[in-house]
Image (cartoon, coloured by chain):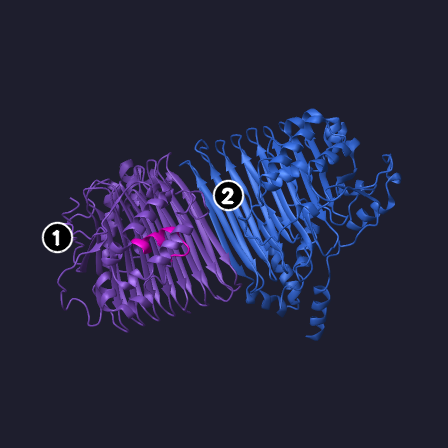
Chain colours: A blue, B purple
Amino acid sequence: MQDSNAIINEVTNTDYKYGFVTDIDTEIIRRGLDEDTVRIISAKKKEPEWLLELRLKAFRYWQTLEMPDWAHLNIPPIDYQDIIYYAAPKKKEGPKSMDEVDPELLKTFDKLGIPLHERAQLAGMAVDAVMDSVSVKTTFKETLAEKGIIFCSFSEAVQDYPDLVKKYLGSVVSYRDNFFAALNTAVFSDGSFVYIPKGIRCPMELSTYFRINAANTGQFERTLIVADDDAYVSYLEGCTAPMRDENQLHAAIVEIVVHERAEVKYSTVQNWYPGDKEGKGGIYNFVTKRGVCKGESSKISWTQVETGSAITWKYPSCILAGDNSVGEFYSVAVTNNYQQADTGTKMIHLGKNTKSRIVSKGISAGHSQNSYRGLVKVSPHAEGARNHSQCDSLLLSSTSGAHTYPYTDIQNETAVIEHEATTSKISEEQLFYCQQRGISVEEAVGLIVNGYAKEVMNKLPMEFAVEAQKLLTISLEGSVG
Amino acid sequence: MKAEQQYIELFTEYENLVCKYSTPVMNALRTEALANFERLGFPLVGSEDYRHTDVAQAFAPDYGININRLAIPVNPYDVFHCDVPNLSTALYFIINDTFYQKEQTKGLLPEGVYVGGLKSFTEKFPEIASRYYGKAATSDKDGIIALNTMLAQDGFVIYVPKSVVVDRPIQLVNISRSDVDTMANRRVLVILEAHAEAKLLVCDHSMDEVKFLTTQVVEIFAEEGAVFDYYDLEESSESTTRFSSVHVKQNASSNVLVNGITLHNGLSRNNYYIELNGEQAETTLCAMSVLDKGQQVDTYSHITHAVPYCTSTELVKNVLDDHATGIFSGRILVKQDAQKTQAYQTNRNLCLKREARVFSKPQLEIYADDVKCSHGMTTGQLDENALFYMRSRGIPEEEARMLLSVAFMADVVDHVRLDILKDRLHKLVEKRFRGELAKCSGCSMCN
């Protein structure tokens, strides 16, 4: 018994393993947010006039807004003037090959296990790595370009494909959408841009890796994915941050536009620094993600594994505008210690015979609070809409909370909508069964939780699924007993 | 002028009259209620708990309030014969907002039981009354309850002392009767001491075609081991607006059933707040509404599990025709110490016409880990296959639809714990679906 306790203690005290800081030259601007900040960021990015105008409009609108308080979250006041809105690893005149990229930077991504280098070929993934505010390196660009696929950093896209960016930027998430969308539109610094032309099936997984490195900075990235008719792409997103005592803000926007018969699969493994065991530090993750199924028979599928962040406020949504379009949302949200998560989805049925499916699995441990909040809306003209939602919660401690707030607004009588939710804990019988067969409590919990989350994990691309499974087990370490 | 203002002015001007025709126990709460009402006002439409019901608009018109307690010249016993066959109830009436006093029929109820008007109860037993009145429905959270506490002058009381079992169901008929648009504010207070048992059936009727606005606050206290059934049947008119708020506080091992049935109405908002404060307490909350034309029923429930080993079952069903609106918002809160809780919540809606609207929000808020909680929500139409099956056996489509709708509602009625009443309700629901306006047949008022 003593042995097993020692083992539990050992793994329990395993800290956030991505919590290192890279010592790298960083260019940062002064703290604070005003119109000048917005202008500086825009100037640094050498942006065209229209984009600056958009930023300023968003900034002015943001000033009129108040921080929303409807979520089941306890958010300490955020001083928006005490944040650095732009930080970039210093660039030596554009690295031409991998050899010229700052070795410290490469080491960072090596530590994170991101295949930026030649070994990327083995992993078969195209990666765009974003550190603090700037996209550092995009791999496989040339290979993709042969097929006409555009995959580049957002700043490059603004320079090279202004028409596409102008057409789609803000078309799904307007700067008037909410508090954080307005803030992001005003100060976003970089992100990824993906365009898949007509009839092209993207041959590899596209991936973006986000990393906050500098202290006191906020990260505001923007992702825009456009899939033209009959296109397909699977997109992955991962994030980590160093361990710091103060909280850092991350407010991103992801927009997806899907045209006729096209499909976009968007997977996230969110592992921002969640704060320490006393709830000190950690990232505030306030993200607006939304996709629109514009064309007929189009499809958007969101898969997310949320294990990090001190506070998560995130609702990846689908607007099902095209007839026969499909929206899916698969989510596993794990909260431990003092983490808080309020996450879910919105499925807005506008077109005829649209279908949506929601599978949400919440796991709460420690003193954490985990909420599912979702909306299924069927508009008066959405004939034959179909939705099935399933939200399960697993409670691992008596001090944690699990909550579900599903909203349904049905305005068409042909809709068939189902929602079910359960809340329970791991049964003693299951645990006993595992222990009896020589599996330690910790491992048994890991096994059971992974089984519980399997339905969602199965939706992740292979490369991520392995990482996500490990992450799930690590996140729950020390939560039993 | 804001809708609140006319009520504040009315009360400030006529406070002495309101108090004069009421009792010290009820008057004691008015000043605080006024302050709360001024602070809270009516809930805003679009606010989290009132997303689809515009309260201020409902209260805005100028309604007459019978502050002077003028007697309405009608003897309900002469005209009202509710015949639930073979169900002999102890029958009482409230006309608008006033309890209809009659000679106490001796021998109908066991010794020590008090059933009657709230006004006379608070006069006769001020100590008991002040211990309970306004204690479950406090006026500091909801503007409508504050308004009711401020203006209500009378109501209905059931008091059952320790270990007394009232076999005979008690029936209260609320009659809305007036020649001008009228507002009525009334209270119901139910006190069941330890191991007491009783059953209450409340029927709401609107007799005239003028507009009625009623606010009703029901407080139910079930002490240890008490058993109580509360059936609330609304059979009013399209021009009736009703704001009802039922507050239940349950102690250990008590068992309360609340069953709200809406067959005819205009706009109804039914709030249910149930607190399980003692271990092994059990509660069942059912609600059903059959809606057509422009009817709207907004059901809101909040069940709190404060202690371990309690069970709650909630079942809310709506059938919507024409451009009716059905709203459900249910919340189950399981506090941190309430281990071994079992809480089940179900909301099912049947849409028959395109213009019908359903808004549903079943919520779970759970802070304990060893619990079994679930909720389910469905919205849909009648099963085509079932319809086809019945038609292929020679049942006309209309009839088949009606039968399936009746079957859809059956399990809410099945929760009724009085067999005779259950049969009666099954018939009433069926009649309602057949479109027969016969309301409660046998009651000469409605025919």
Q: Label 1 to label 2, Cα distance in Å? A: 51 Å
* Residue B414 as seen in the image, left or right of residue A388: left
- What's the chain of the residue with tag 2? A
Residue B179, position as x, y percentages in the image:
18, 42
Please, what is the dominant secondary structure of the magenta stretch?
Answer: helix
Number of marks in picture? 2
Name the one closer to the observer, A44 or A297: A44
Q: For the residue marked with disc 1, what is the amino acid?
A: Asn
Question: Mark 2 falls on what kind of element?
Answer: strand
Q: In the displayed structure, would residue A172 be above or below residue A420?
A: above
Q: Nearer the viewer, mark 1 or mark 2?
A: 1
Q: Crowding at label 2, few (<14), some or many (≥20) Cα neighbours within 10 Å?
A: some
Residue A260, position as x, y percentages in the image:
59, 28
Residue A431, position as x, y percentages in the image:
59, 66
Q: Is residue B140 magenta?
A: yes
Residue A200 seen from this side = no
The span shown in magenta is B139-151
Instruction: Say which residue appears at 49% left-offset and 41% top-offset.
Output: A376
* Residue B64 as seen in the image, left or right of residue A99: left
Q: Quadrant of the C terminus of chain B?
A: top left
Quickly name the residue at label 1.
B75
- What's the chain of the residue with tag 1? B
Q: For the residue marked with disc 2, what is the amino acid?
A: Leu
Question: Mark 1 falls on what kind of element?
Answer: loop
Quickly name the residue at label 2.
A375
Q: Is residue A201 magenta?
A: no
| Extreme-bottom residue of the structure | A2
| Extreme-left residue of the structure | B78
Q: Quadrant of the N terminus of chain B?
A: top left
